[in-house]
Amino acid sequence: MKTLHSIIKISTIAALAVLFSSCADFLNQPSRVDLPSSAFWQDVDDAEYALNGAVADIRYLFDRDYYLDAMGEYVNVSGNVLQRTADKEDPSEALKNGAAYDGFYELYPTGYGGQFSNMYRYCYGGVNRCNYVIDGIQKMIAEGQTEADEEKLNEFIGEAKLFRALIYLRLISMWGDVPYINERIMYKEDVEHLYRTPIATIKDSLVSDLTDAFNKLPEKASKSGRMTKAAALGLRGKVQLYWASWNKFGWPELAGFTPDAQEAQEAYEAAASDFRHVIDDYGLTLFRNGEPGDCDSLGRAEVLPNYFYLFLPTANGDSEFIITFNHGGTGTSQGEHLMADFGGRSTEYANGWLNPRYAIADRYQWTITGDFCPPLVPTPASDPNARTAPNSALNPQSYANRDYRMKASILWDYEMIQGLMDRKETGWVPFIYKTWAVENYEINGQYYTTYETDRCWTGYVWRKFVRNYAGQTAHEGDYNWPVMRLADVYLMYAEAVNFANLEDQKPYAIELVNRVRHRGNLPPLAADKTGTQDAFFDAINQERIVELLAEGHRMFDLRRWRLIEESFCGPGDATGYVIRDTWGNPISGFSTNGTIFQNSTNRAYEQCYIFQIPESERNRNPNLTQNTPWM
């Protein structure tokens, strides 16, 4: 049997598995001419080959989700990395080359809802790929297979349904009501009459699909990248959790949607049940048992916490990962680009398209008390006390005794990182904001060349996702991108229990949140942090911020919890929300000089909560009504 990696890296897989033409319309349509059944769909290997081809393309919808975090408070994206237009290259290739959110120049926490036309189309391409696989395998089963083959074929159907549900959860999270298609589309004419399906109907279909997937999938994956019962349950729980959130907090921008408290209660309970089974029934554990490991002193990085290694290929295959997308690494043309996007020039000539924003540093709590530290004070480097003043953002001591996940995730002034060039180590490199590639820079009697990046606008850079060992270029990573991790499931379970008022399960929910906190070497939550629903929600929100930083969850959390205004500022605010760097300056790259939502109308917020149905699709299909804030 071929391995998943060897199958994915075969350059012809997309053509054989999905038969898609290069057109950029609604469904990225397959060719009208199928491979004859005599040439394909003959055995289990063919079925797996087709499934792997679908997954290899669907991966590009999700494996750069870290860009989505720029719509929240804590991640900044700069540069034109996403401005690779489909006009210049085949859309599927543009997506693979980094244009999953094609048409952007920079991603901001505002103004993004009308920019995802290509994501909309590519999602439907993914749906049609799944439907193609399901249809082909069902025909194989109908034609008669051995009992052993039929079990494996049904497993592949379950996996295709799981991925279809994953894509549809994205579609409804962004656009609300969308056309629901559960059969293969052959011709453009087949989509020109479709209406938007009510979101409740789609939700029910996803729950049904994931229930069927659960029944078909194995408890243990046969190989890396294959889905399991835990994956189906975890995703079904997430669908229910999102449905509960919309019914609890409302979604006024979605025409025809009426929140229902009873619907929310039932969905929270269903989500909690699914998450509980994932947690208890499959022997899953946090990476390295959730232990924090050791953490080096300020300014050193020989010893890093376990959380850092969770985001390197050392963690591939660990039971913490429930849904992942594999990458091939060196020589496969299927490597991930995490180093290129998160690193700087000193780490394999990386681009540094993303930076942690200044606001994230204050979210890392004190390991002594488990509570927040005094807020950091942005301080110009020209201030003679900048490096010594208490709580100064430029004083390294301001970062002492913080949540270990801080050391594992970001670099502040005088923090070291392993330099890497041409697949070789180049020694320790200190990060000092705006002091780029300075040679013979003296620190405690030692001389270094400082970190070089022309993309840092905030005062911090990343350690998370940046490899600390030689051997691969910035584009040759083989890390399995996590779509769902066990820590995420712990926190989603706690959220569901909290909002469903399941008091008998609350102690366990608190214990699970404390397990996540423990990996940061933080003490358990104090009683006042869990005593009320609001207080416990704040604790869960806090853990989701630091635990899932730059993994693509924050934008969805803010929108389903209706927290955009609270997290930034409300409509009509004359000052707006100012994004500053560690020196206190509004960051560059914003047309309003670092200020967002200044004097914004209600409509500007509404357009963040629900996205614009692409006008190109509405021109093809007049039955696609537009979301109200975009009319």
Image (tube, grey):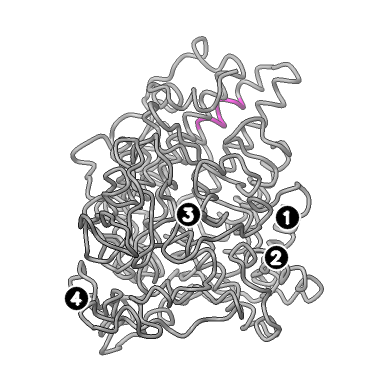
- Sequence order check: which comes first, mark 1 or mark 3? 3
Residue 94 pos. (x, y %): 28, 39
Q: Position of residue 481 (x, y in %)?
A: 49, 45
Principal secondary structure, stretch drawn in magenta = helix
**Label 3 near label 2: C-beta < 8 Å?**
no
Q: Residues within 10 Å of mark 3 (few under 14, many from 20)?
A: some
Horizontal side of 27 relative to 631 (left or right) equals right
Looking at the image, tell me whether mark 1 or mark 4 is earlier in sequence order.
Answer: 1
What SS does tag 2 mark?
helix
Tell me which label, 4 or 2, sits earlier in the chain: 2
- Circle 2 Cα neighbour tier, 10 Å, few/some/many (<14 / 14–19 / ≥20): some
Q: Amino acid at mark 1?
A: Ile
**Magenta highlight range:** 132-138
* Quarter assignment of residue 150: top right
> Would you say the residues marked 1 and 2 are in contact, meaning their CB atoms lie under 8 Å apart?
yes
Residue ID for mark 4: 592
Q: Is residue 84 visible?
A: yes
Q: Amino acid at mark 4?
A: Thr
Q: Which residue is mark 1?
A: 279
Q: Which mark is residue 512?
A: 2
Name the mark nearer the viewer: 1 or 2. 2
Q: How far apart in space, not on screen, are marks 1 and 2 (Cα)?
A: 10 Å
